[in-house]
Structures are given as C-alpha cells and as structure tokens.
C-alpha cells in the first residue's frame, strides 16, 4: 500500500470515528469500521488512541454530575444487554430509558451523552466483545466442518467444529481443519495457516497451506496472496505461502487454475500436474510439479492427490504389513507400544545415546493384478510422545529411505540387526537403501500429517511390487538436538494406536 493510500485509509477511519460520536453512523459505515479495526492492527491502534483522546477530553471538560451520569448510563446499558453486547445500533432503547430515569443530566445534551456512551461501548465491541446483532445478520461465508486436533491463535471467528463463519480471519497453529463454503467449495487448512474469509467465492491466504476442492458450480473461486491471484475453473489444487519468504507455491492436482502475478499482471493457465512459484520478482511454472507443494519453508503436510484413476490405500495393518522402532540403547524407559518413536542424539553424545529409528513394511499384494502405478504418497500421523523437550530441537527434517530387505520381524529386530541401519543418528546404509524423500516438522508441533511423495517413491514401489510384493521403509530424523540428551522424541502413530491412522500408502493406479 502506498503512502497516499495509507493516508486515505486513516482519514476514512477518523471520519467513521466522528460519525460514531455524532450518532450518524449507518449500517454500511459500521460494517466498514469493523473491517478496518478488526483486520488491521495499525488501524485498531489508531482507533483506540482516537477514542481514548475523545474520552479524556470529555472527562476533563464535563462536570462531576455529567461524569457520574455517563458512568451510570454505561453501566445501565451493559446490565441491560449482558457482557457489553449491543442489541441495537447503539444499545437497547428500553435500557437507555431506564438509565435516563435514574440520572440528572447536566449541561451536555442527552444526544451527546448517548453518543459518548456509544463510542465507549463500540470501542469495547471492536476490541473483543463482538457485534451481537450484527454477527447474526451478516451473511454466512462457510462452515467449519472439521477441526480435529487443532490449536488456534487469534483471529476473529469461532473455531468450534460446526461453527458457521462470517467474513473474518482464522489462524490455525496446529492440526488440520476443513471448511465448506456456501458456494460448495471445500478448503482444507494445514497448519500453520493464517487466512481471511472474504466471501463464499473469495479468500486471502497470508501464510501456510490450503488445499481447495472446487465443484463445477463454484468456478471462479479465488484465492489471493500478497504476490498472486489464483482463479479456479472447477478443480482441486494446493497453495502454500511461505512465512519467511512470502513466496506463493501452487500445484494443480486436477483441473485448471489461472495464476496471476500481481506485480506484472501476467497470467499463466495451469492444468492437471502443473505447478507455479510466484513472488514479487519471480513467476515460474512447471509442467510436472511434485505432489508435495514445493518451496515451503514451514510446511508440515503433504497435499492431496488427483482423483483421476483408481485409488488404493494400504496401511501397515494390512496383510503382512508391520511397523516398529529400534533404539540404540537397551533402556526400557521412554518406550511405547502404540507409538513409533524417532530421535537423533548423535550430535552431543559420545555415542548415539537414545537415538531411535522407525521401520515400516507394507504388503503390496493388492497391486499385483492392478494397472501401472502413477502416483504414491507415504503418510504418517504425528502424535505427542511426551518425552523430551521441544525447546532443544529446532525445526526437524526427517528422511525416508526405501530398504531392500523385507524379511525382518517385529519381535526380533534390534538396533544391531536392523536392515540398512548404519548405526548412526540420522542416516542409513546407502548400500542397502535408497533415499526417497524428506519432510519437516516445525518446532513444537505435535499433531498433523506428514509424508513424502514423488517419482523416487513410485519407482521404488514398482520395483518392490515385481520382487516379493513387500515394501520396507526406514524413517530417521536428520536433525539433532541442541542440548545433550534432553531433546524431544518425535512420534508417529503405529498400527496399534487406538484412534490415530496407522502409516499409510495412498496410491493411484491406471484404470
């Protein structure tokens, strides 16, 4: 925003404040005032300062009786409406009449007194009470249909599952949430996300990752970022905005999306499989983008795959599947039957300390009579281990390897005999394994879904399908800890977890 634009917005705010004080504010102007104050921290500060200055001048120049009268009036209004909510434009008329009956009004006219009271109450409303009547009369934009294991921070909208959402801002710190817009669009938020809902056909993504599924009637649904404008034409696509670099990354899973770079006005049409990176200076497109959104600096979750072709889901609980972790020490403390524990203690220990690695095995029999494998995702459910301190582990990188030896048994595998284990903290024996991909979990995150996808995973599964019909993966944490032995133990749900999803392969096959 230019300096001239900023000045114009400030002047607009001050004019709306004056109209509030003079009781000349209409419904549209009230809506605009809320929009300015709720969504912009600088405007909120200016509003508070303006109203504070007005109140100070009033208390300075009003007599004692007028001050007592205004105090009583405000108390009467709050008592009538409950918790400071306004039930009308400036309060309940009956409540005002009752308050007036208890007061002796001084030199100020009743109209100015009511305006001053309204200014104080509107200030409280904008800073957290909420417009009681206005919220019920605003049009609904979307419904929060799923809010599992979510941690929310700030924002102005309700965050309970099933809540109907008006225009406003949501900030999801942890977990995964799904919105259903009135237009029919389904939008999945993958933490951390900062997003503003504007209308049933428009939202603005400030940071984080969303996956949009847009039905045919909702063509034209738009996601805006600081650098890009994405217009959908009936499709499924993912968008990520980096917190540190602000870069917009787009992948089209199915359909068509028009991507506009705001700085230049240049538009590029993306089709199924295409991707794009957009910033103020860069506009790059890819004919074949990886399913995982590229370039994400704080991304946790992998995107959805296209719905084209036959889909097969296999977990470690199916057939000859299995999952287990091995630990470098023989200690029986900090162990789990339900969780798959991962840690890299090599950095500070003379040896490798409490390092742990995870082994997963999938039975591929379901693929033997199926068509060619087109796409694949390995997905893991993040769970809290309650072992160690997150403060001593920075944003953590995890690496997934494909292992050729599938003959290990859960009750016999150890640190010493585990296949492809090079007995170090954060890697594998590359003579017996191949690196397939990596993912990150930000510091302090204990839930969500992570994983890898891409050509390396597809090729590995094709080879294993042709051999013994089993596929083994090794998961290690490449990132060490910054304090000896005290770092967090990361954990994923095993097939024995009572509620969370087990390790899962999501596959797409040719018809």
Image (cartoon, helix red, strand yellow):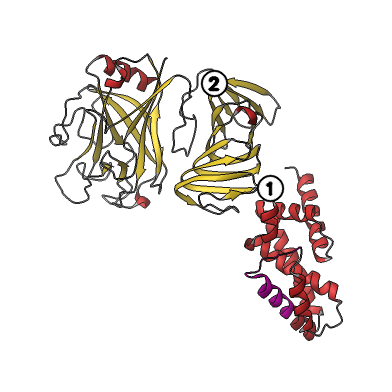
Residue 84, above or below 59: above
Q: Residue at x 72, y 42 (%)?
A: 1
Q: Secondary structure at mark 2?
A: loop
Rounded to the nearest angstrom, the CA distance separating label 1 from label 2 is 35 Å
Q: Is residue 278 visible?
A: yes
Residue 84 lies in magenta, yes or no?
yes
Residue 277, above or below 82: above
Instruction: Point out the image quarter for the C terminus.
Output: top left
Residue 411, horizontal then vertical, whole percent: 14, 37
Residue 483, horizontal then vertical, whole percent: 31, 50
| Depth check, front residue: 404 or 117 | 117
Q: Is residue 395 visible?
A: no
Q: Which mark is residue 139?
A: 1
Q: Earlier in the sequence, mark 1 or mark 2?
A: 1
Residue 19, above or below 365: below
Quarter location, residue 342:
top left
Q: Residue at x 83, y 64 (%)?
A: 23
Residue 155, horizontal then vertical, whole percent: 58, 52
Residue 365, horizontal then vertical, whole percent: 27, 21
Q: Residue at x 49, y 30 (%)?
A: 293
Quarter location, residue 279:
top right
| 461 sits left or right of 85 in the view | left
Of circles 1 and 2, the one toward us is 1
| 6 sits left or right of 228 in the view | right
Task: Confirm or deny contact between disc 1 and disc 2 (CB under 8 A).
Answer: no
Q: Which residues are magenta?
A: 71-89
Residue occupied by mark 2: 274
Residue 377 lies in magenta, yes or no?
no
Residue 32, above or below 476: below
């Amino acid at each position: 925003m230019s300096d001239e634009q900023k000045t114009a917005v400030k002047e607009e705010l001050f004019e709306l404040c004056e109209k509030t004080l003079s009781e000349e504010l209409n419904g549209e102007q009230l809506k605009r005032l809320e929009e300015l104050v709720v969504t912009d921290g600088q405007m909120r500060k200016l509003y508070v300062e303006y109203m504070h200055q007005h109140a100070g001048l009033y208390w300075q120049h009003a007599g004692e009786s007028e001050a007592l009268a205004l105090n009583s009036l405000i108390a009467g209004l709050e008592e009538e409406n409950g918790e400071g909510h306004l039930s009308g434009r400036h309060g309940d008329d009956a409540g005002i009449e009752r308050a007036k009956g208890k007061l002796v009004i001084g030199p100020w006219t009743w109209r100015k007194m009511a305006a001053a009271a309204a200014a104080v109450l509107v200030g409280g409303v904008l800073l957290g009470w909420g417009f009681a009547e206005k919220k019920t009369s605003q049009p609904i934009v979307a419904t929060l249909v799923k809010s599992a294991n979510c941690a929310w921070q700030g924002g102005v909208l309700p965050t309970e599952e099933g809540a109907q959402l008006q225009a406003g801002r949501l900030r999801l710190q942890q977990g995964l949430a799904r919105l259903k817009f009135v237009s029919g669009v389904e939008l999945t938020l993958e933490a951390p996300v900062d997003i503003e809902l504007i209308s049933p056909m428009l939202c603005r993504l400030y940071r984080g990752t969303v996956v949009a599924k847009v039905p045919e009637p909702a063509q034209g649904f738009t996601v805006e970022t600081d650098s890009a404008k994405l217009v959908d034409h009936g499709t499924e696509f993912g968008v990520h905005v980096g917190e540190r670099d602000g870069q917009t990354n787009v992948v089209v899973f199915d359909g068509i999306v028009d991507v506009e770079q705001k700085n230049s006005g240049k538009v590029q049409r993306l089709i199924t499989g295409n991707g794009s990176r957009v910033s103020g200076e860069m506009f790059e497109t890819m004919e074949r983008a990886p399913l995982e959104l590229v370039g994400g600096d704080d991304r946790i979750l992998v995107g959805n795959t296209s719905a084209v072709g036959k889909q097969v889901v296999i977990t470690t609980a199916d057939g000859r599947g299995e999952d287990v972790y091995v630990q470098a020490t023989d200690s029986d403390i900090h162990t789990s039957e339900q969780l798959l524990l991962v840690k890299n203690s090599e950095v500070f220990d003379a040896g490798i300390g409490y390092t742990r690695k995870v082994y997963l095995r999938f039975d591929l029999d379901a693929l033997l009579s199926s068509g060619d494998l087109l796409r694949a995702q390995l997905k893991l459910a993040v769970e809290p281990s309650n072992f160690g301190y997150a403060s001593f582990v920075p944003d953590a990188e995890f690496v997934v390897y494909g292992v050729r030896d599938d003959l290990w048994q859960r009750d016999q595998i150890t640190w010493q005999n585990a296949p492809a284990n090079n007995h170090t903290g954060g890697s594998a024996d590359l003579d017996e394994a191949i690196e397939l991909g990596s993912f990150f979990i930000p510091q302090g995150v204990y839930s969500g879904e992570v994983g890898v996808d891409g050509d390396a995973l597809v090729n590995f599964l094709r080879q294993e399908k042709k051999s013994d019909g089993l596929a083994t993966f090794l998961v290690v944490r490449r990132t060490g800890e910054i304090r000896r032995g005290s770092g967090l133990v990361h954990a994923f749900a095993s097939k024995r977890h009572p509620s969370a999803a087990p390790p899962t392969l999501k596959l797409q096959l040719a018809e």
